[in-house]
Image: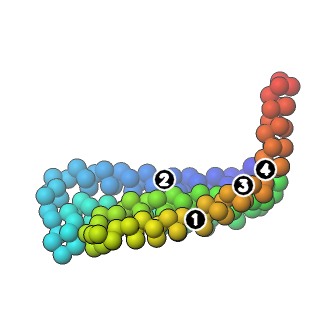
Amino acid sequence: MDTKLYRPLIKGAVGLLVLWFILIIIKDLPMFQDIYIQSIGLTVIALFEIIISILMILVLWNMGKELTPVLETNLPEWPQSNVFASSIIQLIILTIAYNALEPLAHNFLKEDFLIYQIVFLLLALYPLIRGGKGLYDSVDVLMDFISAKSSDTSAK
């Protein structure tokens, strides 16, 4: 495999780790612990968590944009690899967005929080169906890959 395949993965992992460390540092700063913003009903820490989560989503989005074309060219034996990878990235993005925006949704939707959950469920259905279909369509390729790997290890 080409090193072009690893570049987006490493860039994405480094970006996510840096943002995660920033979030840990911000959470431990004593000056932000008790500051509450009345207009949006959140603490400063919760607001920083939302901002960092949005930045994490952007890092994942860029990683997906860089990774999917590379998968298509570097794994020609598995043509659905880019569909499967982009679906996984989209599901991770939706999970981060759901968790990040949940405090805001609780504050603004109150009794109608079910709407928030239904919207994210509907948003998650597309990558789930798309990724599942991509995986289903490439079962033969994956079985050939697994059988080739197992025959290589048994020959040694």
| Farthest residue, direction bottom | 39
Q: Crowding near pointer 1: few (<14 within 10 Å), some, many (20+)?
A: few
Q: Amino acid at mark 4?
A: Val
- For the question of whether residue 66 can be seen, the reply is yes
- For the question of whether residue 4 can be seen, the reply is no
Q: Nearer the viewer, residue 100 or 149?
A: 100
Q: Which mark is residue 139?
A: 4
> Which of label 2 and label 3 is nearer to you?
3
Mark 4–mark 2 CB contact (< 8 Å): no
> Which of label 1 and label 3 is nearer to you?
1
Mark 1–mark 4 CB contact (< 8 Å): no
Q: Amino acid at mark 3?
A: Leu
Q: Which mark is residue 125?
A: 1
Q: Earlier in the sequence, mark 4 or mark 2?
A: 2
Q: CA distance from mark 4 to mark 2?
A: 32 Å
Give residue 122's position: percent from left, percent from top. 52, 68
Q: CA distance from mark 2 to mark 3?
A: 28 Å
Q: CA distance from mark 4 to mark 3?
A: 6 Å
**Disc 2 marks which residue?**
14
Where residue 133 sits, quadrant-wise, is bottom right
The residue tagged with tag 3: helix, strand or loop? helix
Q: Earlier in the sequence, mark 1 or mark 4?
A: 1
